[in-house]
C-alpha cells in the first residue's frame, strides 16, 4: 500500500518525545515543512514537492533578550488557524509562537506558574497575541491536545486533551471554553490523542488504541495495536486513515469508518511498516487524504517518508 521514498536529512537527531514530528503542507508554494525537536533546538526542513530543493533552519528555545538558554523543548507543533498558520514551541520556560516558516517569533509567554490549558487570542496577522483564558481540567501533566475542524458542520466537541494518567478532557470552544466531558484513565499515560467525527482516538503506553464517543465517553472500540508504548497518532481527516507509531519499531495504518447501523466509528487494519532498530517518536500524514506519511526516530538524523504505491 505504501512504499519508502528518499529520506530527508535533519541537522540533529530527534529526541525521545511523544509526537516529535510536525508537518505543514503549503500548497500554493508546493512545499511541505517538517519539524523535529532535539534537546533545546527545533530542526526545520522545507522540502519542495519535486524533491529537488531543501531549506534548513534551527530554532533555539530562549527567552526574549536572553542570548542563550538550556531550556529543554517539550514539543513543537504547527497550528493551522482559520486566518494564518503558526509554529508553536513549548519548553520548560514558556511558550513561543513563530511565523510558520520560523522566520519571526511573534509571541512569548512565560510559564512562571504550573498552568494547565492556556487559550490565546490570535489576530489574522501581526504580533498582537493575547492570553485569553486559562482552563483547568487535568490534575496530571498534559501530554497532547487535538482539535477538529468541522468546516460548515456543527461540532459538539471542538477539542480533546490527554494527560499522563490516561484521562481525557473534551472541550467546547467559544467566547469561553467549557468542559463537556471527562473520560477517566487507567493510570497509564495517554501519549497521543486525535479527534475525528466526534470520536476521540487515544493511544496509550500499553500499546492500545481506544475509540471513545467524545461527548458521552462511550467506548466503541479497543485495539491491542502495538507491543510497546505508543508515541504518536495521526488522522487523515478526508479519508479516515489513522496512523499509529510506537517503540516496537512499527508504523501501522488503520481505517476509521462510520457504521451506518450503529452510527459509531469502527476501526480496521490496513498496512504495516517496520522501521528496523528504531524507537519511533513521531509519525504524521503529509496531507489530508493520507497519501503520504513521515516518521522520525530517537537518535535518528533523518525524516523517513512513505507514499502510496
Image (cartoon, rainbow, N blue to C red):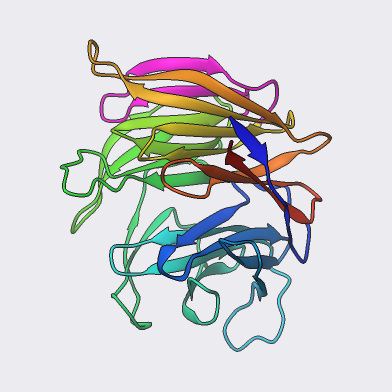
Instruction: Give left or right: position of 276 versus 266.
Output: right
**Is 225 contained in the magenta span?**
yes
> Residue 213's image quarter?
top left
Quadrant in which the N terminus is drawn: top right
At x 81%, y 34%, the residue is 276
What is the residue that sits farthest to the right in this orientation? 277
Q: Is residue 292 visible?
A: yes
Q: Position of residue 122 (x, y in %)?
A: 32, 71
Q: Nearer the viewer, residue 58 or 161?
A: 58
The residue closer to the viewer here, 222 or 162, is 222
Is 57 above or below relative to 2? below
44 in the magenta segment = no
- Residue 56 at what x, y percent from top left? 68, 72
Which range of residues does the magenta coloring cover? 205-229
- State whether residue 166 appears in this view: no
Residue nearest the viewer, comparing 192 with 301: 301
Locate the C terminus by quadrant.
top right
Measuring 52% from the left and 50% from the top, which residue is drawn there? 286
Left or right, residue 187 beside residue 210? right
Residue depicted at 55% across the width and 75% down the height: 102
Amino acid at each position: 500500500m505504501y512504499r519508502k521514498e528518499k529520506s530527508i536529512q535533519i541537522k540533529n537527531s530527534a529526541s525521545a518525545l511523544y509526537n516529535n514530528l510536525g508537518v505543514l503542507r503549503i500548497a500554493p508554494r508546493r512545499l511541505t515543512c517538517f519539524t523535529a525537536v532535539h534537546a533545546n533546538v527545533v530542526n526545520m526542513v522545507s522540502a519542495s514537492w519535486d524533491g529537488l530543493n531543501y531549506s534548513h533552519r534551527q530554532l533555539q528555545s530562549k527567552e526574549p533578550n536572553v542570548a542563550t538558554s538550556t531550556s529543554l523543548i517539550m514539543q513543537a507543533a504547527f497550528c493551522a488557524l482559520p486566518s494564518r498558520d503558526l509554529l508553536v514551541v513549548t519548553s520548560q520556560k514558556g511558550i513561543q509562537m513563530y511565523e510558520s516558516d520560523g522566520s519571526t517569533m511573534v509571541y512569548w509567554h512565560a510559564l512562571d506558574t504550573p498552568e494547565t490549558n492556556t487559550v490565546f487570542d490570535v489576530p489574522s496577522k501581526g504580533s498582537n497575541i493575547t492570553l485569553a483564558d486559562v482552563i483547568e481540567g487535568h490534575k496530571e501533566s498534559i501530554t497532547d491536545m487535538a482539535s477538529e475542524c468541522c468546516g460548515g458542520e456543527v461540532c459538539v466537541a471542538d477539542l480533546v486533551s490527554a494527560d499522563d494518567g490516561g484521562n481525557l478532557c473534551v472541550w467546547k470552544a467559544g467566547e469561553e471554553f467549557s468542559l463537556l466531558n471527562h473520560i477517566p484513565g487507567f493510570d497509564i499515560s495517554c501519549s497521543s490523542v486525535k479527534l475525528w467525527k466526534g470520536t476521540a482516538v487515544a493511544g496509550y503506553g500499553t500499546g492500545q488504541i481506544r475509540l471513545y464517543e467524545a461527548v458521552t465517553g462511550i467506548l466503541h472500540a479497543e485495539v491491542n495495536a502495538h507491543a510497546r508504548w505508543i508515541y504518536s497518532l495521526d488522522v487523515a481527516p478526508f479519508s479516515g486513515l489513522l496512523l499509529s507509531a510506537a517503540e516496537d519499531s512499527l508504523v501501522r495504518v488503520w481505517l476509521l469508518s462510520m457504521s451506518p447501523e450503529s452510527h459509531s466509528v469502527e476501526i480496521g487494519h490496513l498496512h504495516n511498516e517496520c522501521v528496523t532498530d528504531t524507537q519511533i517518536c513521531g509519525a504524521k500524514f503529509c496531507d489530508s487524504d493520507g497519501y503520504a506519511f513521515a516518521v522520525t526516530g530517537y537518535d535518528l538524523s533523518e525524516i523517513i517518508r512513505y507514499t502510496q504505491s
